[in-house]
Image (cartoon, helix red, strand yellow):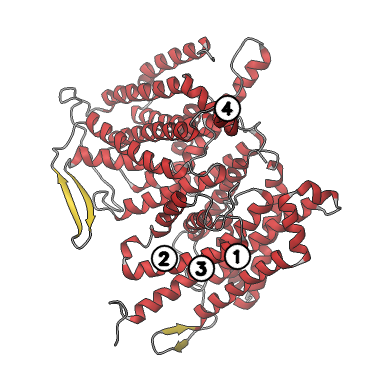
């Protein structure tokens, strides 16, 4: 067996794939955060909880209603997005005239409520979710499980689709215009409050979609979102929230870097993203793709 | 120039008298816990209430100082890692005997101040929401360091931290006698914050909170002011954490988690951001609630979340903030304006 830089290729490519998968989740989540922040100036702390709810929705749909994975992949994000719309209408919309920090505090409180309720109901040991596409293929240098390949490919498509809609379509043009000057866009006859609500729902739906994708890989667990969201915050700080493509590239890139760190220096794998964040803040405070305000 | 309000001094005198007789009425360990969290929340409030910076990672100072104090009191000897090319990781070993409580707490406080200096220098490069996210992320990094470092004892934490005689002579093994030590520490910490707020330095901090661009144009080195405030806040949060470790004779991962960072935000929010006494009041309420609800398990999380939501939606000035506003309505001479960030419109 040949070795690459002193590491067996199985381990290297295995971790690289895991890194890509984590990167896919970082990208989907930071994309949702960026879209929501762009329009609403709210950092959605509930994002991690909504990711977790997506996974739980998939699990519940399978367990209680017999809806298979492919059905849940569509249904769960829609259900959780509906929940997000409700949250936005009931709570977040009351805070737009205040300092942005209140939005952060409110969504933090909501995240605690959701996590507490799920922990009470399901404990923290985690629930299994059957892999919908078992098996894989041997590429010669590594074993590629089908499901993992699917996650990377599918989330890449979703990310690029979101980028296309926001950057290249009429709807996206309205959205970007409303980000810059909501009052002016409103004056042109576009219902900006409804647009904000739907955008929040869309961001939440992306988080839930990531949750469904994660369910067969990691066990479905009430605390799966809380720890992830902090890493995603670091990803968002590194990338800057100015650009959609920036969020996607940073998400995947950092996932890969984290995976490589697991191979070459496992002790730092938990902290590498935070260290990168500190370095980026020293050199380029607005983030790699951010614009200085 | 804002002068110290005479009513504030009366309140302080009354609270001090209450603090002295309180252990006759209430269990001292509970009181010590309240005092530690009150100091923690007051230190946190220095940033959010007077500089307008929301730190979502204050647990890193609180919890790490607890570990440092616990280690100094139990083991003493410090081993610092360093790295050189080709030689790899090595250790500098500084032989120290196990320390008395006051030195251990001092050590914890100094280390917290040092971390505050590093973290502050990184975090103040961003403002507003980004500042919150950066502090949260850096606190999570400290959390992982605590999980992996050897001296913290991992999941077990540092247990059975000895409480040696204070200054080598005063026996504080009994909880009642240690209570008065904690009360004294709280008073010192509170006084430092009180003086900071009411000094010209504090006035500049408020100017930065209200209008940073204006403060810059007036010639203030805003970043330096922010950094100093951050270090003071971190050091006092560390003081609170180190003291808590000596109270419970335990330093554990609980105190470094992001949940702990969230709790201190909640305490300050409930009591009143930007008020002198609010955070301490909020800390007393939340600690009481946690003790009362300890048997309800996960419901505590739900209730805390619900309090967050209610406080943000309808109760932004907090208990003390509302009281002050009420007093101000009643009599024209009473009280300084409620200093919350609630009324500040977001800068576009």
State the separation of the CA atoms marked 4 and 3: 45 Å
Identify the residue at horizontal 75%, vertical 48% (top origin).
A181
Discs 1 and 4 share one subunit: no
Q: Are marks 2 and 1 in contact (CB under 8 Å)?
A: no
Discs 2 and 4 share one subunit: no
Q: What is the total number of numbered labels drawn onto the structure image? A: 4
Q: Residues within 10 Å of mark 4 (few under 14, many from 20)?
A: many
Q: Which residue is mark 4?
A: B319
Q: Which quadrant would residue B61 be assigned to in this image?
A: top left
Q: Which residue is mark 2?
A: A258
Discs 4 and 3 share one subunit: no
Identify the residue at horizontal 64%, vertical 75% (top origin).
A67
Q: Nearer the viewer, mark 3 or mark 1?
A: 1
Is residue A159 toward the left or the right of residue B263 in the image? right
Return the chain for callout 3: A
Identify the residue at horizontal 21%, vertical 39% (top origin).
B72
């Amino acid at each position: 067996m040949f070795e690459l830089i002193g590491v067996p290729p199985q381990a290297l490519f295995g971790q690289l794939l895991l890194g890509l998968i984590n990167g896919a989740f970082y990208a989907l989540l930071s994309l949702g955060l960026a879209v929501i922040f762009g329009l609403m100036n709210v950092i959605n702390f509930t994002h991690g909880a909504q990711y977790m709810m997506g996974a739980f929705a998939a699990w519940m749909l399978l367990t209680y209603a017999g809806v298979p994975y492919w059905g849940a992949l569509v249904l769960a994000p829609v259900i959780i997005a509906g929940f997000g719309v409700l949250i936005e209408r009931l709570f977040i919309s009351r805070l737009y005239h205040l300092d942005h920090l209140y939005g952060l505090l409110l969504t933090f409180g909501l995240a605690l409520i959701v996590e507490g309720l799920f922990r009470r109901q399901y404990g923290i040991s985690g629930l299994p979710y059957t892999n919908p596409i078992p098996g894989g293929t041997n590429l010669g240098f590594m074993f590629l499980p089908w499901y993992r390949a699917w996650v990377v490919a599918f989330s890449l498509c979703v990310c690029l689709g979101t980028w296309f809609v926001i950057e290249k379509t009429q709807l996206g043009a309205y959205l970007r215009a409303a980000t810059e000057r909501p009052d002016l866009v409103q004056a042109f006859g576009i219902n900006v409050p409804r647009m904000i609500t739907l955008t929040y729902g869309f961001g939440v739906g992306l988080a839930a979609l990531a949750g469904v994708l994660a369910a067969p890989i990691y066990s479905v667990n009430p605390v799966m979102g809380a720890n992830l969201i902090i890493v995603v915050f670091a990803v968002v700080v590194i990338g800057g929230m100015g650009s959609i493509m920036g969020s996607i590239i940073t998400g995947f890139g950092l996932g890969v870097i984290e995976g490589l760190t697991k191979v070459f220096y496992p002790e730092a794998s938990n902290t590498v993203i935070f260290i990168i964040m500190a370095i980026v803040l020293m050199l380029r405070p607005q983030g790699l793709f951010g614009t200085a305000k | 120039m804002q002068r110290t309000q005479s009513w504030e001094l009366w309140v302080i005198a009354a609270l001090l008298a209450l603090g002295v007789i309180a252990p006759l009425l209430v269990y001292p360990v509970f009181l010590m816990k309240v005092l530690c969290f009150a100091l923690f929340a007051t230190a946190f409030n220095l940033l959010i209430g007077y500089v307008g910076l929301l730190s979502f990672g204050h647990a890193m100072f609180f919890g790490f100082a607890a570990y440092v104090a616990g280690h100094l009191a139990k083991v003493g000897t410090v081993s610092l890692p360093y790295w050189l090319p080709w030689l790899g990781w090595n250790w500098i070993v500084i032989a120290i005997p196990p320390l008395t409580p006051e030195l251990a707490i001092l050590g914890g406080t100094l280390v917290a101040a040092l971390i505050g200096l590093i973290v502050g220098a990184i975090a103040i490069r961003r403002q507003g929401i980004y500042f919150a996210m950066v502090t949260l992320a850096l606190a999570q990094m400290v959390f992982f360091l605590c999980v992996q470092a050897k001296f913290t004892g991992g999941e077990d934490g540092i247990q059975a931290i000895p409480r040696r005689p204070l200054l080598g002579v005063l026996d504080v093994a009994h909880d009642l006698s240690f209570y008065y030590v904690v009360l004294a520490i709280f008073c010192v910490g509170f006084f430092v914050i009180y003086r900071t707020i009411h000094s010209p330095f504090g006035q500049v901090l408020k100017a930065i909170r209200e209008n940073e661009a204006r403060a810059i144009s007036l010639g203030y080195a805003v970043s330096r002011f922010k950094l100093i405030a951050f270090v003071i806040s971190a050091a006092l949060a560390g003081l609170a954490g180190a003291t808590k470790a000596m109270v419970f004779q335990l330093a554990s991962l609980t105190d470094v988690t992001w949940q702990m960072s969230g709790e201190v935000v909640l305490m300050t929010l409930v009591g009143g951001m930007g008020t002198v006494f609010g955070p301490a009041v909020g800390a007393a309420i939340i600690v009481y609630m946690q003790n009362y609800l300890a048997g309800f398990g996960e419901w505590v999380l739900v209730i805390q979340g619900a309090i967050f939501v209610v406080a943000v939606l309808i109760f932004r000035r907090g208990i003390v903030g509302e009281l002050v506003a009420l007093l101000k309505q009643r009599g024209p001479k009473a009280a300084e304006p409620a200093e919350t960030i609630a009324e500040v419109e977001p800068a576009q």
